[in-house]
Image (spheres, grey):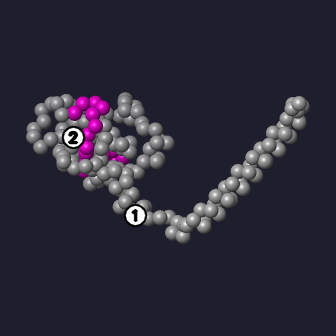
Amino acid sequence: MSLCSVLGSPDPRKRSFLIKMAAVGNIAGGSVVRVLAYGALVRLDDGSLGLVHISEIDDKYVRDISEYVSEGARVIVKVIGEKEGGRFEFSMRKAKGAEPETAEDIVDDFGANTPVFKDYNAVTRAAFDDKLREFISDSTENLADIRRHHEHKLGLKRR
C-alpha cells in the first residue's frame, strides 16, 4: 500500500490556485496527517507532503512523538530539504517562534502589488462600462430572438 493511497491526494483544482509554499528555507503552516513512530507526516496548506523526523520535533530528546503532535493538529514547520518524488523534509524545532509565510508575503516579494494597468483612469472605466452595457443589451435582444424563433418552430406561440 503506497503512501499516497493511505493519505489521499489533494484536489488538483484547488491546488493549482495555491502558491507553492514548500521551498527550502520557507516557513509554512500545515496539518499533521499521520503520526508515526519515527516522525509525523505533515501536509502544508498548498498540498505539499513531507516528514518531520522525530529529531526535528523539539530541541529536547523526544521519546514519544504523540506527546508533541496528534493527527489533525496544526503545526508550523520550516522546509529543510526536498527528496525525490516531490516529498519534503520539515523541521518544527527550527520553526519555533517564527510566523509562517503567507501567500501575500510571497506575492509581495515578486512585486505583484504594482498596478497592471498604469494608464487606468475614470475615462477608460466609463468606456468599459459603456461597452459592457451595450454588450448586455445586444445579448438580451439576441436571446429574445432565439427564444421567439424556437417557440415558433415548436408551435408554442404565446396567446
Q: Quadrant of the C terminus?
A: top right
Q: Is residue 87 magenta?
A: yes
Looking at the image, which residue is at 24% across and 30% down? 70
Residue type of the residue flagged with mark 1: Gly
* Residue under the point 67% across and 55% down: 132
**Residue 93 appears at what percent x and percent y?**
17, 45
Instruction: Please state which of residues 97 and 46 is positioned toward the viewer in this rendering.
Output: 97
**Crowding near pointer 1: few (<14 within 10 Å), some, many (20+)?**
few
Sequence-first tag of 1 and 2: 2
In magenta segment, residue 123: no
Residue 17 in the figure: left or right of residue 2: right
Residue on which disc 2 sits? 53
Residue 111, position as x, y percentages in the image: 40, 64
**Mark 1 to mark 2 CA distance (whole Å):** 35 Å
Q: Is 143 rendered above or below residue 122?
A: above
Q: Residues within 10 Å of mark 2 (few under 14, many from 20)?
A: some
Q: Is residue 138 left or right of residue 90?
A: right
Is residue 99 something that shows in the picture?
yes
Q: Position of residue 118 (x, y in %)?
A: 51, 69
- Residue 34 visible, this orientation: no
Q: Is residue 27 above or below residue 129?
A: above
Side (left or right) of 121 relative to 83: right
Specify start and end residues of the magenta stretch as a single range.
69-88
Judging depth in this view, the residue of 31 and 146 nearest the camera is 146
Q: Which SS class for mark 1?
A: loop
Could you tell me which secondary element the residue under label 2 belongs to? strand
Q: Write the residue at 18% across / 34% down.
A: 68
Q: Which mark is residue 57?
A: none
Choose top left, top right, bottom left or bottom right for residue 153: top right
Give the labeled residue for mark 1.
111
Disc 2 marks a residue whose amino acid type is His
